[in-house]
Every structure is written in structure tokens, then in C-alpha cells.
Amino acid sequence: MTTTPTIGARTTPSMPVEHKRVRRHRAMLTLALGVGFGALAWLRLPPIARDTLWAEDGRNFLQSALGATFDLFTPYGGYLHLIPRLIAHTAVATVPVEGYALFMSAATSLVAGLCAALVWVMARQHMRPVWALLVGASTVLAPLAAREVLGNAANLHTILMWTLFWALLYTPARRSTAIMLALFTACAALTEVQALFLAPLAIWRFRDRGRRIIVAGFGAGVAGQLACALLASRKQTGFGHVDAASYPYGFAINAIMPLAMDTRSIGPVLAATGPLVPLLLVAIIAALLICLLRGRTRRTHLIVAAALTLGVLVFVAGVHTTPLDLYDYAHHSPDELRKVWLARYGVLPSQLILAALCVAAGSADRPDATSRPHAFRTTVTTALAAAILVTFALHFTPTDTRRSHGPAWQPQVGAARKECAKGAEEVVLHQTLGWTVKIPCERLH
């Protein structure tokens, strides 16, 4: 019986054809799964949202690409945005002006889908395939993701951070895989400044040569972000105040409640019960983890702890660096809670909570664990898997994507061409948040 060659191994004449065919089929399956997940991310967005540019996508990334400058490593907000700038340059180089918004939405949806497939591949190393599929699917099906993360390049860093978490837990079998993951981790880290929070995971099985290759790519990306943070200033405005008690309260509101109820119900529930329902949901998740982690391996415990720690850390960091009064949940009145603001800072933590539950439910027991029947655990894991699927299905169509009301891009291009025909040299097109993009008329002829 042949085995998969490991890093540094030479293929022998008896196995190259079989292994090449297997690897090709696996690659095609992963690619197909990535395209499928990308289609799901695209379909979660209303048509008007797909044709509406979000925030920095237009005003910064596309605008800079239109200037034909080499800006891939130009900082914005104090850090680098490599992949969004690559997407913007590709849009300018390949599609007409009227297709910019659709291209940005489609390209970022595809990247999210490919990340989902990659997460599925890497998560299988730590849990059974079905649970790994749920983890991968959460990349694009996390309930709150469609509101502000999916379909735009500016917030693609959230999905890249999620994928980096799994990349730094993965041990590749082949050098070629390790090199490709090293390139990915470098590009992802050059897009997400919070990648530094993942540095402790770099010591995971560091003696493995393939792991060291991945960590080298990750380290290069983090080093680039740190250099940018030291050399480029980040303008900080006095946004407001967030009380210490609002951090755990906000975490439960943004990371946990969307997993259990429709986003339209969260505000009324908070107005009626205050922190009681969030506390109940935290207690349920804690009880589930305690039940599912009994008898599991030390590796499983470490992954769960890492996921939960990272989830808390990124939420606190996000709110701390943008302390809007909207996030001061502990001091909101019932009327304010009824209209509660849900932040994109809850997307990655909710994915990590799902990951903690899935790895606890789908990993193997310790070799020395008792062999008594696990009927109760089987019931719990089955119910958990069903609940996750129901959550994905019920939240597939979002109530609000923050681009659901436009302004749509394509209708503006027709009006802009008329202005250019009247002799204008450039036109101004609108996007979300009241931001604009200046388009030279020479591109509209």
C-alpha cells in the first residue's frame, strides 16, 4: 500500500501516476468547492448591493488604481491593503467603468469562496470531514457576514484573518503545498494588520519543515505590516466613549446573538430583557463546549482555546480602535437597544465560536479515553450540526447589507457619459457613506 509522500520525499516510479491523479482530483474538487462557496457569497447579496461600491473600494482603492500609480504597498489608515489594491487594479485593467462595482463584488466573493475551500481542506486535519465542511462554509455563511463583510474588498481582511488562523494550524505534507500557503499567508498578512495576533500559533509544531515554510511567509507579511505601522501615521479621531462593561456585552450581542436569532429580533429582545438573553446564550455555548471537550485530545483543547481567545481579542481591538458611542451597549437605554447597531467586528468572533464548537464536536477522543457508549454526546453533536445548518439557511438572505439602498453604480455611468459629451474632463460618481469616485472622461468614451 502506498502512502502520500511527505516534504522532502522523492516520488518513486511505482507511485507518480496514481499520486498525480489523486492530487489533481483533490485540487479540482477544492477549486470547484471554492467557486461554489463564492457563488453562495455572491447570492447572499441583493442585486443592488452587488452593484454598489463600498467605502474604501471606490474612494481609495479604485481611485488610486485609476491614477495608474504603483500603490500596492501604499498604506491607508496606518496599514497595508495588498489584496484589495490588487483587485482594484485588476478591475481597472480588465473591465469597463460600468463594471467596476460588479467586478469588485464578484472578485471578492470569489476570494471569499476560495478561502472557504482552503479552510475546509486545512480544518480536515483537526476534525472529521463533515464538521470541517461546516467550518469552511461559515466563511461565507456566517449570519452577520453579508451585512458588511461579503462582496467588498475593504473588509476582505476579516475573511483573510479567519483563513490565516487555519493556515497556521495546518501541517502540509508536501513542500509545494507549504510554499503556496507561505505565499498566501504573506499576502494575507500584508492585508490584515491584526495578523500579528496570530503570532503565538507560529510555534505550533514548528519543528516540521513545512510548517516553518508557512511561518516564514507569515512572518514576512507581518514584518511588512509592522514596518508600515512604524513609518505611516494613523489618524485617530475622538469618536466617542465605550465603557469597559460594553466590551463583553457587545461581544455577546455581535458575535453570539446573530448565531441564535434573526438580526431584526436582536434589538427588541435586548430592549425587553437586557443582558439576560446574551448571558443565557453564553452559558449554553459554555455548557456545550464543556460537554463536547470531555475526553478530547490536548490538541483539540488548544485549538478551542486559541479560537475563543482570538475571537475576544479581535473584537476588543476593533472596538477599542474605533470607540463609537454606538458600541457603548452597557449604557444604552431600552429604546437605543431596540435599534441596536450590529458591527462587522462580530463576524470573525462568530466564525471562531462556530469553529470551537465544530472542532470540539468533530475531533477524535484521547487514546486513553473511556470506551463507554457516547449516546448523549452523539445526540448533542447531531443537534449541534442541525442547528448550525438551520442557522446558515435562515440567515442566508440578510435583512440589511448596508448597501441595500445603493447608490447603484451602473445607472450613474450612463448619466456620467452625457456629462462627458458636454465637454467635462471628469465626472463624480457616488458610492456608500456619501463617498465619491472621480472618473476621467477619457475612460468613458
Image: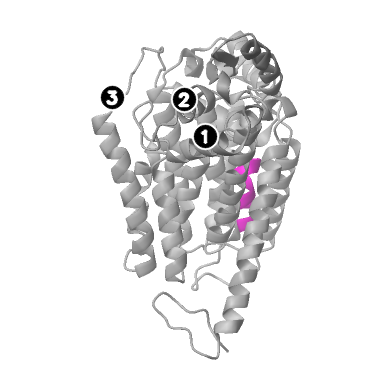
Q: Residue at x 39, y 34 (%)?
A: 71
Task: Determine which residue is flagged by label 2.
Answer: 60
N-term mark: 3 or 2: 2
- Local crowd size for mark 1, using a 10 Å CA cut-off: few (<14), some (14–19), many (≥20): many
Q: Is residue 303 left or right of residue 278?
A: left
Q: Amino acid at mark 2?
A: Asn
Give residue 43's position: percent from left, percent from top: 73, 38
Nearer to us in this view, 88 or 161: 88
Task: Answer whether labels 3 and 2 touch (C-beta < 8 Å).
Answer: no
Q: Amino acid at mark 1?
A: Ala
Q: Which residue is mark 1?
A: 88
Q: Is residue 198 above or below residue 433?
A: below
Query: At which x and y percent is residue 14?
Result: 55, 91
Give the residue type that dot 3 points to: Ser
Q: Is the stretch drawn in magenta largely helix, strand or loop?
A: helix
- Which image quadrant is residue 402 in? top right
Residue occupying the far left of the picture: 230
Residue range in magenta is 131-141
As helix, strand or loop, the secondary structure at mark 1 comes to: helix
Asked which quadrant contains residue 342, the reply is top right
